Amino acid sequence: MLQFQAGECSDRPCPVETTLNIISGKWKGIILFRLLGGKKRFNELQKLMTKVTHRTLTLQLRELEKDGIVKRTVYAEVPPRVEYELTELGLSMTPIIKSIYDWGLNYQNNVIPSPSPAD
């Protein structure tokens, strides 16, 4: 079990709060998970995340870029090509994203009932 000092979060935000502020948002965790596989273009991400709107994906990517988690590269081509990838800081979140994935898989397998076959 992790142990923390009582006053550890008194002079600045708790580290858990800081982390959650960076990855909060319905789609940020999924964006990070998808970028673990390497660079992706915007449309690739949108195809992998079919329920996210264009606007929401744009906003979430901008926030991750602002926080130094995602790097956006624009290539001077016609038409312009834009790729997104995790920065070194973003890659350091790999164990966190993997743990979230593993926990979710365990939850799905052990808590959520499997759909019953159609009769």
Image (cartoon, rainbow, N blue to C red):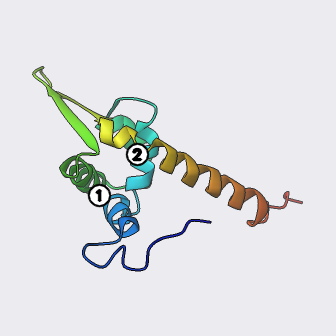
Q: Position of residue 82 (x, y in %)?
A: 21, 31
Q: Position of residue 40 (x, y in %)?
A: 35, 32
What's the residue type where badge 1 is placed?
A: Thr
Task: Tell me: residue 3, above or below residue 71.
Answer: below
Q: Nearer the viewer, residue 19 or 23?
A: 19
Q: Residue furthest top?
A: 77
Task: Tell me: residue 38, above or below residue 53.
Answer: above
Residue picked out by circle 2: 32
In the image, taking residue 96 as reference, residue 109 lies left or right, namely right
Distance between the alpha carbons at the discs numbered 1 and 2: 15 Å
Judged from the image, the secondary structure of the residue bearing numbered disc 2 is: helix
Q: Quadrant of the N terminus?
A: bottom right
What's the residue type where badge 2 is placed?
A: Leu
Q: Nearer the viewer, mark 1 or mark 2?
A: 2
Tell me the quarter of the picture where residue 21 sits.
bottom left
Residue drawn at point x = 39 percent, y = 41 percent: 92
In the image, taking residue 109 as reference, residue 6 lies left or right, namely left
Residue drawn at point x = 76 percent, y = 56 percent: 109
Dot placed on the residue nearer the N-terminal end, 1 or 2: 2
Task: Tell me: residue 102, above or below residue 77.
Answer: below
Residue drawn at point x = 44 percent, y = 36 percent: 36
Q: Position of residue 38 (x, y in %)?
A: 40, 29
Q: Which mark is residue 56?
A: 1
Tell me the quarter of the picture where residue 86 sits.
top left
Residue drawn at point x = 48 percent, y = 71 percent: 4
Q: Nearer the viewer, residue 59 or 100?
A: 100
Judged from the image, the secondary structure of the residue bearing numbered disc 1 is: helix
